[in-house]
Amino acid sequence: MDRLTNGTGTRAFEALVYTPYQHVTWHWRTLPPPPPPPPGVEFAANDPTRIASFAAAAGDDSNKIWVSATGSGDVKGCTHLFDAEKLAWCKEERADWVLPFYGCAQYVPQLNKLWFGISSREHGCLLCASDLSGASKTQPPSLHTALEDTAARAPDGFELVTARAIYLGSGKFCLARFFAPPMRISLYEDKEPEQFAVMAGVQVILIPSSHGGKSVAMVERNSQRYVFNEDETYWVL
């Protein structure tokens, strides 16, 4: 399930569905857009259907998806619940909290049954983990662990534009980060400013905890820097 541009310049919430009775068995089906957020809450600037973070639930609620919208100023964000079986939003389940992630979070049952993704910007856009199993309309989830890798730090003269965590299985993640000069600097440069992406491979493992049981830890693998000089790049992965 993804949120894609539908070709008309507007956004659409869509699902990739399988229908064996049609000539094209796999196709995109437009779903109902998220309910309007409360006053002061935005899904994104100039794009009321863009979502800030989302995660599929697990267990008995594995057919549902948490979708968060961010607030602005003193107004807190909110989270909606989408029922993938009924293809409808659970309007009565709107919660006055947001997921502790930036973008998509992936449930990894082998790693203490935690959800992993990129943390919010105020937490540094790091690989992080959270337990969403107890989340409800009145009970927000909390950030469980933030794991910092050396590739997370922006070099001097650059700032982080966006980041993604792609789960590869067996506790391995590819962390993709896109860096560019601050806008106030690049506007005054004669040549095209350098923009680049850093792909970092990490592995999350379980280690003995001082409180008993096991906790998560990160092992850094290889990383690679990709420079974009001519083409304007909006997304990495």
Image (tube, helix red, strand yellow):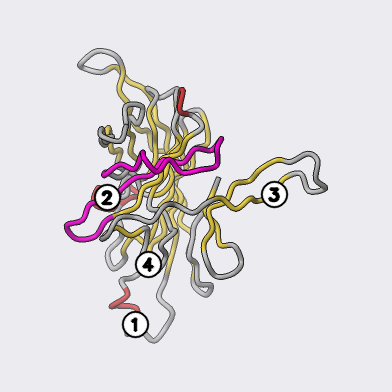
Cβ–Cβ below 8 Å for labels 1 and 2?
no
Q: Amino acid at mark 2?
A: Gly
Q: Amino acid at mark 1?
A: Leu
Q: Position of residue 79 (x, y in %)?
A: 34, 45
Residue picked out by circle 1:
187
Cβ–Cβ below 8 Å for labels 3 and 1?
no
Q: Position of residue 30 (x, y in %)?
A: 60, 53
Figure check: 192 above or below 112: below
Q: Position of residue 125 (x, y in %)?
A: 32, 49
Label located before the other in sequence (4 or 1):
4
Tag shown at residue 124:
2
Residue drawn at (44%, 59%), measured in percent from left and top?
49
Marks 2 and 3: which is nearer the front?
3
Q: Quadrant of the N terminus?
A: top right
Q: Nearer the viewer, residue 46 or 86?
A: 86
SS type, badge 4: strand
Residue picked out by circle 4:
180
Magenta stretch holds residue 140: no
Figure check: 33 above or below 210: below
* Residue 43 placement, left or right of 157: right
Tell me the crowding category of disc 3: few under 14, some 14 to 19, or many 20 or more residues within 10 angstroms, Cα based: few
Label located before the other in sequence (1 or 2):
2
CA gap, disc 3 and disc 1: 42 Å
